[in-house]
Image: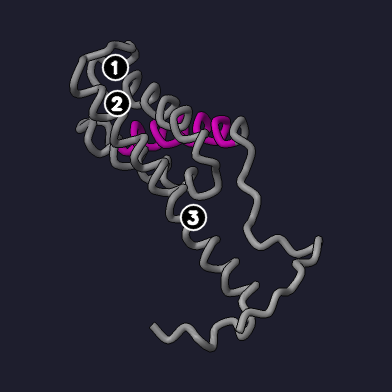
Amino acid sequence: MVEWRPLRAAVRPVPEPVPTPFVWVAAFIGALLTVGVLSVANGLAEPLHALLVLCVLAALLGVCARFVAAPGTAAVCWLFLNGFAVPPHGELAWQGYPDAGRLVFLMGAALLGTVIARLVNARGAHRRITPGGDRGASS
């Protein structure tokens, strides 16, 4: 039997995502710091390392963002990757398939972070509003 319970106004079942402009500013600052640290640590010798680190940054930013923030987050990270990590350094250039692949990886990482956050938040919200909470979840 299902028992309906009204949700209190003070309790939010799912956390509100961060506004998109704040995520893009965080992507700008995070990518700038990431590329700077990699440059100091000589990690820009291989662009793949910078791509992987920026994918992790995009995924972490995706955790607190909306889905609509993913393209901008990927674009900002790609600009820093293309401008400072991929030869020739300091010059933005479109190289075709390699840059398209890098954009796809960055976009996928941002979307993956957002999907994971939505699933975790939905599961937590379900547990908070379900009578009995954790008792029935044995699997």
- Which residues lie in the magenta part? 23-41
In the image, is residue 70 part of the stretch drawn in magenta? Answer: no
Q: Can you tell which quarter of the image residue 48 is in?
A: top left
Q: CA distance from mark 2 to mark 3?
A: 29 Å
| Residue 125 as seen in the image, left or right of residue 41 | right
Task: Measure the alpha-carbon separation of dots 2 and 1.
Answer: 6 Å
Q: Earlier in the sequence, mark 2 or mark 3?
A: 2
Please tell me the numbered disc located at residue 117. Answer: 3
Q: Are marks 2 and 1 in contact (CB under 8 Å)?
A: yes
Q: Residue at x 39, y 24 (%)?
A: 80
Q: In which quadrant is the C terminus drawn?
A: bottom left
Q: Which residue is mark 1?
A: 89
Residue 40 inside the magenta-drawn segment? yes
Which amino acid type is shown beneath numbered disc 2? Ala
Q: Residue at x 63, y 73 (%)?
A: 128
Please tell me whether residue 90 is drawn above or below residue 105 in the rendered image: above
State the separation of the CA atoms marked 3 and 1: 35 Å
Write down the residue under mark 2.
Answer: 85
User: Considering the numbered disc 3 on the image, is that residue within a helix, a strand or a loop?
Assistant: helix
Quarter where residue 42 is shown: top left
> Please, what is the three-letter code of the amino acid marked with disc 3?
Ala
Query: Mark 1 falls on what kind of element?
Result: loop
